[in-house]
Amino acid sequence: MAHLRFLGQCALALMLALPAVAPRAQTPDDIIVQAREALRRKDAAALAAARAAVQNPPHPLAMWVEYWELSNRLDQAQRSDFDAFAARWPGTYVEDRLRNDWLLELGKRRDWAGVRAEYPRFRMDDDREVACYAMEALLQDGRKVVAAAREAWAAQREPDDGCALLGRDLYATHRLKAADAWAAAQRHVEFRRWTMARMAAGLIGADTARSVAALLDDPLRYLKQRRPGGGVRGREQGLLALMRLAQSDPDAAAAQLGRGWSRRLGPALTATAWAQIGKQAAIKQMPRAAADARRAWYLWDRAHRRHEAPPWSEDLLAWQVRAALREGDGARRRWTLARRAIAAMTPARQADSTWVYWGAQAEAALAAHGAAGEAQRRRARRALASIADQADFYGRLAAEALGRGDAPPPAPAAPTPAEIASVHGNPGLERALQLIALGLRSEGVREWNFTLRGMPERELLAAAAWACERAVWDRCISTSDRTRAEVDLAQRYPTPFRDEVLAQARAAGVDPALLYGLMRQESRFVTDIRSGVGATGLMQLMPDTARITARRLGLPFQDSMLADRDTNLLLGAAYFKRVLDGFGGSLPLAAAAYNAGPGRSRRWRDGAEAMDPAAWTETIPFSETRDYVKKVLVNSLYYAERLGTQPLPTLRSRLGDRLEAADAGGAAADQP
């Protein structure tokens, strides 16, 4: 003990002998960051103190502190509080965002006069619950907005007070019918929105809501009941149960249809049941999917509704096309199914480059002999030509199919001094960059995007250039992506950290254009970004993946090292190379594996090795991964152009001829 006391005395003497270090003075920027943290804690006293502290002298971000302070007590605020804030900060992002919050508060208070007065001033108009409150307020005033009110209610995706209230009032006044409630319940069950399905059924009655809740919990039990209920309610509930069962077991749902439920449902609802079973089978990549879709169409036609569009979602029709693409034989019937599903889509959806491309493929594949067939082939070529100038996945495929060269668009003229001055003097953009620099990225991104609304293209290019100069790469890219007449590829596909990327690409044996294509999609070159599941940094690596990769490279590793840009890049390049080798160099398979895991990519490939890789990409079950693979491959083409790769690759060369690949097998252990 004496020894310990002696050591303590020595340490104290040493501390007294050292020169005192004054604590760092708190800066106005510190107050901004602390105020945001106080909002997270709902610390009213700290927010009030911060609001006072940024007033004298006024901080450029003072409006944000005021917004946080007032929004924290909005449930107790008066109209005068909101009016004073709006008068002090007119035309700003925070004024309109507080108006959004205030409209929600007015709706909860059932202050319909207040909602009617304030809603026309809401510029963003991007809140579904606010839209429902606005429709309710207009109906309360006797306005003839029933169609708009029904549309707002039908667009509800998550439970909220405003749309629930609107639905109840529309139903109570017979402006929504039971058929509308059942149709809404079907939409919600299809997209696994269970609470919303129960709410829709609840419009019909409490008993119906309880029955729907029970069948959603145990659909097979409901379907096996001898007398599950007759009439419209029994049929509609049977369809919901079949849809729910199909999501876990399409074979079991099909078996129940064959055990009497098809007779109970009738032809039209049975057709819809088969369509839903086919959709789930397609998502699960089951061989039966296309046959289920064809059966659905056969029954729909048999119900004497050949010239009536079925009540199937755009998503379901898209999965019918994907089921046809994955079908291995019967070329004519698969393209017939694809063409019919595309024809049933809305005109807006048909115009999407995805369905223009596959519609053209179907038209060409089904072309007859002679003059009629040549006319079909001309239609297919015209369809491809209509999207060949688009810079997306199917636009590039269409251009290559037509034999067009891919000359990059001419670079636009540099922003003029006047354009630069206009952007640099824009207070909203200045505030956005300040917020991002302080680590308040979410707030900064929202301020930036709000400020860009209605901005001319030349100023958009100048704003993108400013973001690039400040190394705010995600805003540089997204801002430049908004232009149509003038395209600046250097802004849309920037090459930050170029020396480091090229060095790591060489070390790993990976095409640097692919690394850039991955990073643009993964992180938009934001080095400190972190996803909700823990993926970190430029290459969005998970800690376990990084740890295994580091061990293979013989490098020490701690999770905190992922925040280091160069370490993240080194490990990401090495991991991608391993994944790529694990799939025999197949870029679609490797990109899918990088996003969703090698195990999933391998399962999605099984049984599809001979597929057109473009068709395989379109049939990836996860929409995020499907979009990711397309964008990474297209990104890599633009980066090849920017890096001067010779010869320039084509999208077809990136896709490859077949998916069949030598499988090293080890990469599956690196990531789930």
Image: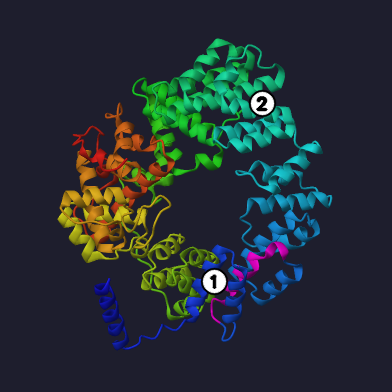
Dominant SS type (magenta): helix
CA distance for labels 2 and 1: 48 Å
**Residue occupied by mark 1:** 35
Does 640 lie within the magenta span? no
Report if residue 372 is visible in the image.
no
Q: Position of residue 271 (x, y in %)?
A: 57, 21
Q: Nearer the viewer, mark 2 or mark 1?
A: 1
Which stretch appears magenta? Answer: 59-76
Which residue in the protein does label 2 denote? 211
Position of 404 with respect to 200 (left or right) is: left
Q: Quadrant of residue 202?
A: top right
Q: Residues within 10 Å of mark 1 (few under 14, many from 20)?
A: many
Residue 540 location (% of width, % of height): 33, 54
Q: Residues within 10 Å of mark 2 (few under 14, many from 20)?
A: some
Q: How is the image coloured?
A: rainbow
Quadrant position of residue 666:
top left
